[in-house]
Amino acid sequence: MKLSDWLERNRWVWSLIGVLVLWAILSALTSRFSLHSLSGVAVSASFLTIVALGQMLVVTTGRGNIDLSIASVLTLSAYASIVVTQGVDGRLPLALATVVGIGLVTGAVNALLVVAVRIPAIIATLATGYILATGTLIANRWAAGFSVSPLLKTLTAGRVEGVPIMLIIALIAVAGAGFLLRRTVYGRRLSAVGQNERAAELAGIRTGRVITAAFLASSVLAALTGLLLGAYVGGAFLEMGTPYLLQSVGAVVLGGSLIFGGSSTALGTFFGSLLLVLIVTTMQIAGLPPGTQDIVQGLAVIAVLALAGGGAVRRRRAAVPPAAALGAGRA
Amino acid sequence: MDAIALPTEADTEPATRSAGTAVARLGGISKAFGPTQANDRIDLVVEASDVLGLVGGNGAGKSTLMRILCGVTRADAGTIEIGGVGIDTGLYDTRLAQAGGIRIVHQELSLCDNLSVAENFFLEAPEAAQPLPGWRRIYRARAHAALDEVFPGHGIDVDAPVGHLQIGQRQMVEIARAVTAPKVRLIILDEPTSSLGLERSRQLRAFIRARAAAGLAFIFISHKLQEVVEIATAILVLRNGRVAWTGSSAEASVAALVAAMGGPTEGALRSRRAARPAVAADAAGIVRISGDVVAPLGRDVVLRAGEVVGLAGLEGSGQRELLHRLFGRVQDGIARQGKASFVSGDRQKEGVFPLWSVLNNIALGRQSGRPPLGLVSEPAERSAARGAAERLKLDPARFDSPILDLSGGNQQKALVARALVGDAATILFDDPTRGVDVAAKEDFYALVSDVARAGRLVVWHSTEDIEFLECDRVLVFSGGKIVRELTGDQISEKAIVDASFAHAGALERDATAGGRGLAEWIVDLAPFASLAAVFALMAYVNPLVVSLFGLDLLLGPAIALVLVALAQMFVVGGSEIDLGVGAFAGLVNVVSATLLVDSPALGLLCLLAGIAAYGLIGATIQVRRIPAIVVTLGASFIWIGIGYTLQPTPGGSSPEWLTALFGWQLFGVPAALVLIGVAGLVALAIDRSPLGVTLRGFGNNANAMKLGGWSPLRYAVARYMIAGLFAMAAGLALTAINTASDINAGGPFTLISVAAVVMGGCALLGGLISPLGVVAGALTLALIGALLGALNVSTDYNAAVQGCLLIGMLVLRAAAARREDAR
């Protein structure tokens, strides 16, 4: 197999290279950056990875689908877990059930709007996100104190043999998502729906169910991240989920998944998360103000997308067939 | 079709045209798509007054040749000479073809169906349009004159949106538009009579003769060979991408053309069917069709295992609908035993998964009915696919190639293999031999016999009537119903055509097209009605609002929202969404309250840069083909970042002139109210102008616009810059009203602007916008916020109420659209 083919099939390599290069530069330039701070980066990236894996599934369903409600789901879940646990480990199962419930209900509403009512995903999830935002405002008034469950705190901040437990959780999630995409019937169906929904339907796939599952997974993963992140930072606050909106899309895109759906890589999403968190960390170390950090993140996402190009991968793979030539124009 | 420097149109106009100069001369044209040689050294010459008949089976290369002639597809090799001037094939494109007077009328219609008939005439010849009110008049007159000339007694309303016309009427509009275009020299008519009734078809042929005598050249493409022989002066026959025969039509006959095309002959198809054992009388019935669709027959139709059943009729007579109903799950009037699988001839849209290998494309057929978490095993898939592929003569060595590397015929074989690896009792074919070469067709016909003999039911819809000779039974459709059932020797092309047309005349006569239903008026008025309702409620809660002062207090702050919503509207008109529009308004708010006060020149420069950045966003999205959502989401972070950097905490002040701009009165009416009206009217004026019509055209049918020589890049940039200007006005309004700035001030506007656009009656799919409706929608949403305040509801709930309203509106519109479809 030629190298270019191999790279085409393993697009996650690019984000790995990005991580290694940025890490090398950081280590060389600043003495403050060490293996220890890399593990701090890894923990931050782990939270992002879990959210981004859900986003990745939604993106894979194609037609430019994106879940914009995850920021609110994450914040609301963090509040809910704190309100429910009240710092008592014994109430953890209840908190877990509440958080998963929030995820399932939101995901189900999103899926209902997208699949049954055929509202574009961005608008449906934008709207549900706003409705949940009201929920967080109300929760914010209720949630007195910042007492998190000690067990959860240990889980999120602890280490095994120096390896952060969160990283292990994230890697398990990545392995699971990778297996789902590559080895299961669902993974095939998801990819088929993302490439060509009409053809998938005519091939006998119940596309509605496939899309619904992706939205459910996205919301539940965001909700679980809210639970874990709340425990890690020791509380919940209103704008907690906001950065994850752009970053989750950014991680998916940086990792080499196709923004128009149909082909995704869980490993790439992991490295994409790591790369994005590294970029932010670099900016923090460099002492850039938060405004500039926003600008750089926005530019990075647009630049990567513009370089990859929406149709680029498809066009590179094959000569343009006659029917597509009409619309494809000059590459 | 953009970003390439072009010679000006004047360069391509030949200075003088000597007699005998060919209108178009193609020499040695070759074009390959992957392994398929679509055109192989084809010569084609058309002179003035020629009517060149172009014939060939599906996949013979006619469409590719015509696309090359129109500049849509670039030839790999060969020469192109238009009006006596040789043009480099590498530079030849749609604009040069247009300039050379070449027009095509396709099977896939190239009209924008959201625009009126007259506006579509504008797209064809925009030179006569001026950005003045009443500019449509000239196109209305042109449309009338053109339709009257080609199709006397057409009865088409030139102000009706094309989408409201019936398919035959659309084809009439398209033909009339092309043949009467100014400076036109060569018209390519691709299956022009496929949707026309006998009378219209006769009118068209009479027109072609008259215009050809006057010097216009035509290329006439048709499956109806008799028509071609009658109308053409010369005929060119293509077969597998090569010229199979060429000569004057006097030397041609239908039989000779059929022989030259090399496609299936009547005899071969008949004898294959005869060789197939007869369907057993006691074969199990698999499908029963009853209800409305069989009403003309007066009895149910039962399809049995082992049968090959054809669905025939004029295109769009209900064959496809029945095929899809047969595939669906539980339906009224359709009972089906066992599973069904579907094979479409529209491979790109309905068949292939372009990112996958051939093997994955085939193997998907095995996975129906399996649990989602079941494992897939490649070796098992490979062996299952191998069996199906061998029956189809598809080489298993190609299993690992990307599906798009295969020729059309082989792609189709892979799709048929997908249907065969499953255990479906019924296989549904939707025009399966479209764009397939002759050899692959033969393999396919043999396979159909095979599959049926093995005990499956094959239901086959074709657009080539000759293929029905392969069938055991043919159901002929007309006007959505089965009007004839032909079996065995009754099946002939003539019998099918006769039955197809039996009811076709009735179709064209009940032309209610162009009229607007009551439901549409209600949808159009909904934004204004809901504004009135909310306002009435508000007045009931607090009677003070019914005064100019009250209105100013209530609606004054809404001007920013109105402007953001109008900005969003233009983006939505291109079927995209701007997630950064609120943040951009917030940034303008910050810039105008800080830089513009301290150093006006720098502030102005920043604002101009902002508009340029919006244009750049439009260009990036268009050139790189990436989703607008992600780009604008990224941009929103950039706007907010810049805003924070300029002004970390809220503050600043409004420039005096800006405050004054919002502080006057006109006959006692406060400025804000007047400005809201002005904003709406400006947006309306843009939308109604030639530019606005062009933008709507792109939102509806970008491919047709490109084909017509319009630059997508230029109009994407224009669209985003218009949106940027409105968003900027919103930011300035925020500054004037709040006399301070906050980068977060604009954020919430993003969702509300989408909601206002939806409430205003715009279609999220693009191409349909309504500026005044959007103004009403935005005001309604602003009033709802105020209403909640008056009812003592915490502002915490604003976001939830707005979100719910947006969802509610969309659900209602979806329900209304569904009812519309059902009608």
Image: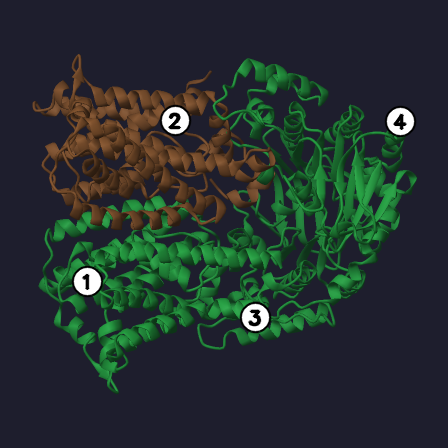
The x and y percentages for residue B285 are 79, 34
Q: Which chain is green?
A: B
Give the CA distance from mark 1 to mark 4.
83 Å
Q: Residue B281 occupies which quadrant of the picture?
A: top right
Q: Residue beneath label 4, please?
A: B275
Same chain for the residues at labels 4 and 3, yes or no?
A: yes
Is B748 positioned to the left or the right of A316 in the image? left
Coloration of the structure image: by chain
Q: Is residue A85 visible?
A: yes
- Mark 2 nearby-residue class (10 Å; few <14, some 14–19, many ≥20): many
Mark whose residue sits in front, 2 or 1: 2
Same chain for the residues at labels 2 and 4, yes or no?
A: no
- Mark 4 nearby-residue class (10 Å; few <14, some 14–19, many ≥20): few
The x and y percentages for residue A324 are 56, 40
Q: Residue beneath label 3, please?
A: B518
Q: Which amino acid type is shown beneath numbered disc 1? A: Leu
The x and y percentages for residue B378 are 53, 16
Is B136 positioned to the left or the right of B769 in the image? right
**Extreme residue toward the right, this view:** B489
B555 in relation to B488, above or below: below
SS state under label 2: loop
Q: Which amino acid type is shown beneath numbered disc 3? A: Leu
Mark 2 chain: A
Mark before the other along the chain sequence, 4 or 3:
4
Mark whose residue sits in front, 1 or 4: 4
